[in-house]
Amino acid sequence: MKNLIKHLFIGAIVSLISVTVNAQEKSSEAAQTGKVTCKFKVEGVCGMCKTKIENAAYVKGVKLASWDKNTGIIEVVYKSDKTTELQIHESIAKSGYDTEKVKAEAEDYDALPNCCKYKELEVH
């Protein structure tokens, strides 16, 4: 019984070390390439929203932007020496869409096509 507990304990330690080393390697790789991946919520409702949101996310340094209409989550890969996550939020908000960190100005929201007016779908 003591041997079994000893082997389980050693296995757990080895697994923990492996996970830690793997996370450090990924962090180190991101630091070397300067590429960062982030995900955040963006309000929107239709296929046109998808196009507008993704296009707005493509500020200088963004390598990939993909918004999921069903979840409202955008995944962005960008070079941290070229832009910041906040700049991406600001660009998307400027196109009329609220993000987790930046709300669209009324005039930017009002400029959206009618099919993209997500606030009008909210229940009050």
Image (tube, rainbow, N blue to C red):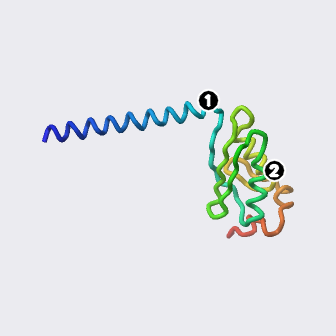
Q: Which residue is mark 2?
A: 94
Residue found 71% across the figure and 65% down from its top? 45
Residue found 37% across the figure and 37% down from its top? 16
Disc 1 versus disc 2: nearer the observer: 1
The mark that comes first in sequence, 1 or 2, is 1
Q: Nearer the viewer, residue 25 or 37?
A: 25
Q: Secondary structure at mark 1?
A: helix
Up the image or down, 30 lies above or below 91; here it is: above
Query: In the displayed structure, does residue 62 sit left or right of residue 28?
Result: right
Which residue type carries mark 2?
Lys
Give residue 72's quadrant in the image.
Answer: bottom right
Tell me the crowding category of disc 2: few under 14, some 14 to 19, or many 20 or more residues within 10 angstroms, Cα based: some
Distance from disc 1 to disc 2, alpha carbons, whole Å, reads 31 Å
Which residue type carries mark 1?
Gln
Which quarter of the figure is the C terminus placed in? bottom right
Query: In the displayed structure, does residue 88 sit left or right of residue 70?
Result: right
Q: Nearer the viewer, residue 32 or 124?
A: 32
Residue found 73% across the figure and 46% down from its top? 89
Q: Which residue is mark 1?
A: 32
Tell me the crowding category of disc 1: few under 14, some 14 to 19, or many 20 or more residues within 10 angstroms, Cα based: few
Query: In the displayed structure, does residue 12 sit left or right of residue 64?
Result: left
Q: Position of residue 61 (x, y in %)?
A: 75, 39
Q: Position of residue 54 (x, y in %)?
A: 74, 53
Farthest residue in the left direction? 1
The total number of labels drawn is 2
Q: Secondary structure at mark 2?
A: helix
Q: Position of residue 95 (x, y in %)?
A: 81, 53
Up the image or down, 69 lies above or below 56; here it is: below
Q: Nearer the viewer, residue 92 or 120?
A: 92
